[in-house]
């Protein structure tokens, strides 16, 4: 059979399509198999001329800053914090970094400094839930001791300490209290340093404690761990700067 010009033209087009198609597939494969961006927590920020590899507006950029573990800075994504309705919300506490994260729908809405328990009163690792919320709360275990004249004689007193005649024990104020156990573990306002300083509770700055108190509900899950919470790929974006 003799091929007509029309059939020869169709054959050429068919061959050309077969040649182009593999290249197209290879292109798609190479795009989809790009290496994932690095975990910000594991970057060595001490190297000379370190450059943050993430876009400044991203949460990953916040974590990848050299002073992250020492800083008192707070990361806030107001849109996530105020999102309604929330499909899920939780609080994550990293004891090693002395920082916490408020997680909404799988993304970090707030990252903040905190202070956990000292070695003598360690904050216990575990999975907890908020079982009580009280905006104005005072400790029934720790506080200050006053003498009969109203003078403070002990700023780190315990309820079991002897009370001087005419004196009194006053529990430490713990605003925006969120109880995690009936043994006294909870989150509340307190002095925050970049190290453990409490009797076991999670101390927060006032603005952070207020936000968490207002946004969370009874039953909100709280995870306390030694290790950091990995940053979601959705909160990473490479820097455009070379």
Image: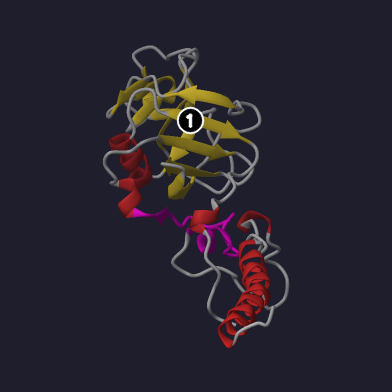
State which quadrant residue 103 falls in: top left
Residue 156, given in percent of the width and then of the height, sits at 49, 29
Identify the residue under disc 1. 222
Magenta segment: does it hold 133?
no
Instruction: State the residue in front, 18 or 210.
Output: 18
Identify which residue is drawn at 50% across, 70% down: 55
The answer to whether residue 154 is visible is: no
State which quadrant residue 166 falls in: top left
Instruction: State the residue in front, 37 or 61.
Output: 37
Q: In this view, does 140 lie above or below 38?
A: above
Magenta segment: does it hold 64?
yes
Q: Is the magenta stretch mostly helix, strand or loop?
A: loop
Residue 124, given in percent of the width and then of the height, sits at 60, 25
Identify which residue is drawn at 31% across, 37% down: 215
> Which residue ends up furthest to the bottom in the rendered image?
5
Identify which residue is drawn at 64% across, 76% down: 20
Instruction: State the residue in front, 104 or 226.
Output: 104
- Which stretch did the figure color magenta? 59-77
């Amino acid at each position: 059979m003799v091929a007509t010009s029309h059939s020869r033209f169709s054959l050429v087009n068919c061959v050309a399509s077969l040649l182009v198609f593999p290249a197209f597939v290879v292109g798609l494969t190479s795009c989809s198999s790009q290496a994932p961006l690095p975990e910000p927590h594991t970057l060595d920020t001490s190297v000379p001329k370190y450059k943050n590899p993430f876009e400044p507006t991203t949460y990953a950029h916040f974590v990848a800053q050299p002073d992250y573990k020492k800083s008192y800075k707070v990361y806030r994504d107001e849109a996530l914090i105020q999102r309604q309705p929330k499909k899920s919300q939780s609080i994550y506490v990293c004891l090693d970094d002395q920082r916490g994260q408020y997680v909404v729908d799988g993304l970090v809405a707030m990252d903040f400094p905190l202070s956990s328990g000292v070695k003598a009163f360690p904050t216990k690792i575990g999975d907890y839930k908020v079982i009580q919320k009280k905006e104005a709360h005072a400790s029934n275990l720790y506080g200050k001791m006053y003498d009969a004249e109203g003078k403070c004689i002990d700023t780190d007193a315990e309820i079991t300490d002897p009370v001087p005649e005419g004196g009194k024990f006053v529990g430490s104020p713990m605003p925006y209290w969120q109880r995690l156990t009936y043994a006294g573990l909870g989150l509340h306002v307190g002095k925050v340093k970049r190290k453990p300083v409490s009797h076991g509770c999670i101390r927060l700055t006032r603005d952070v404690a207020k936000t968490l108190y207002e946004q969370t509900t009874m039953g909100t899950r709280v995870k306390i761990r030694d290790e950091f919470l990995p940053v979601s790929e959705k909160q990473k974006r490479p820097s455009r700067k070379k």
